[in-house]
Image (cartoon, helix red, strand yellow):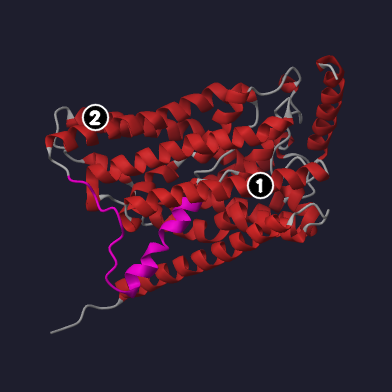
Amino acid sequence: MTTGSLQPVRNKNRARRDKQIANETTPLLPSKHEGSSEFHEFNGASFSGAVFNLSTTIIGAGIMALPATMKVLGLVPGIVMIIFIAFLTEASVEMLIRFSRVEKMTSYGGVMGDAFGRIGRMLLQICVVINNVGIMVVYMIIIDSLRYTSALSVALAAVFVVVTAAIAIVKLVSGSVQMPRLFPEITDLSSVWNLFTAVPVLVTAFICHYNVHSVDNELDDSSLIQPIVRTSLALCSTVYIATSFFSYLLFGDSTLDDVLTNFDSDLGIPYSSLLNDIVRVSYVLHLMLVFPIIFFALRLNFDGLLFPSARPISSDNRRFAFVTLLLLSFVFLAANFIPSIWDAFQFTGSTATVCIGFIFPAAITLRDAHAIASNRDKILSSFMIVLAVVSSGVAIYSDVFAIFQRSKPAPKY
């Protein structure tokens, strides 16, 4: 079979996909053709553009909390956990893509709706809204024309990694820092429970599931999606391991929940102030580039929950302004009351995020509405659900226990 004979089939399949996107009544992802003529000449995303788009979805402000997980777990378990969560993420994404192919679904919401009906779709939307409101670190890039912005945002995050690594190496060579703990420090039962508080942060760091279909929809060759997912996860895992290792090496047990806060003091090397500014400014610029897209996803899903039968929000200026102002007000107000990003990750990572990343894909596989899941798929899905429920439950218990411990009055002597 020649390449020429394949081309009409691919274009026909692509046209069918595009039609389905436009007909989504309650989309989790916006249609790339809906109400905008500027998309008509789009010819498909490139491999590198898709990798950068998905990597931008994964790498968010969660990277700032990863060094703190090393302080909790130690370097060896921490690095092993990053790799382990990356593998579980790849497996859960593969399940979503495979089940979406059966009924030619073009969104995560479509797959959930196919498996569990309107309630399943709505439950996923609620989780996406909670996830985006709570952490604002996961976001979607819809068209390949944004690939240069995505590449720039990933590059700015890489600046943070490179500068941090350079500072840590200089201080290690000069003998002003020591190798941090390789394993966790366990002294009592509460320190064991505390290990589980790192799980929500790690889960949040890899969440990308509700943007995978968006990236897939933009590809001219859908068979590339799995290599794209693997490449993106490998890239992000490398960045995460480097960030966690060098930041923890640099600050040791003084590593804060938000490691960016550590770059507000004297680093003990020449040009410390300048290097601090480079690290902080590069990451602030990274967040500035991606915040509008994160907010776009949040607004789309929140509007879908409030007005499921209404016309698209882009064609209703009053509703657009109302939803935008409501969400911005809530986000900025909540930011003033949340004590640290660690607390935000604990809440969202233990609830909505773990559902989006692992529980829902595993539930779709176990539901197996089209009888395509193998025994291996079902065993892995059961493992993911048990692991997610147990680890999240212990993490929540540990957080609540820590809150009560802090609230207890000091003993009087």
- The answer to whether residue 411 shows anywhere in this view is yes
Report which quarter residue 191 is drawn in: bottom left
The residue drawn where x is 70% and y is 47% is 96
The residue drawn where x is 51% and y is 50% is 85
Left or right: 133, with 10 as reference point: left
Residue placed most toward the observer, 78 or 350 = 78
Left or right: 23, with 62 as reference point: right
Q: Quadrant of the N terminus?
A: top right
Q: Is 86 one of the magenta-colored residues?
A: no
Q: Which mark is residue 390?
A: none
Q: Quadrant of the C terminus?
A: bottom left
The residue at the far top in this view is 4
Secondary structure at numbered mark 1: helix
- The answer to whether residue 215 shows anywhere in this view is no
Question: How far across and how far down the image is residue 342, in percent?
Answer: 39, 55
Which dot, 2 or 1, sits closer to the camera? Answer: 2
Residue that carries the numbered disc 2 in the rendered image: 275
Q: Measured along the vertical axis of the image, is residue 281 above or below residue 37?
A: below
Mark 1: amino acid: Asn
Question: How far across and how far down the image is residue 61, in percent?
Answer: 43, 42
**Could you classify mark 1 by the number of other residues whose Cα lies within 10 Å: few (under 14), some (14-19), or many (20 or more)?**
many
Q: Measured along the vertical axis of the image, is residue 325 above or below residue 292?
A: below
Question: How far across and how far down the image is residue 166, in percent?
Answer: 26, 30
Left or right: 103, with 249 as reference point: right
Question: How far across and how far down the image is residue 340, in percent?
Answer: 37, 54
Mark 2: amino acid: Leu
Q: Please state the extent of the stretch shown in magenta in the rendering.
A: 178-203
**Could you classify mark 2 by the number of other residues whose Cα lies within 10 Å: few (under 14), some (14-19), or many (20 or more)?**
some
Residue that carries the numbered disc 1 in the rendered image: 301
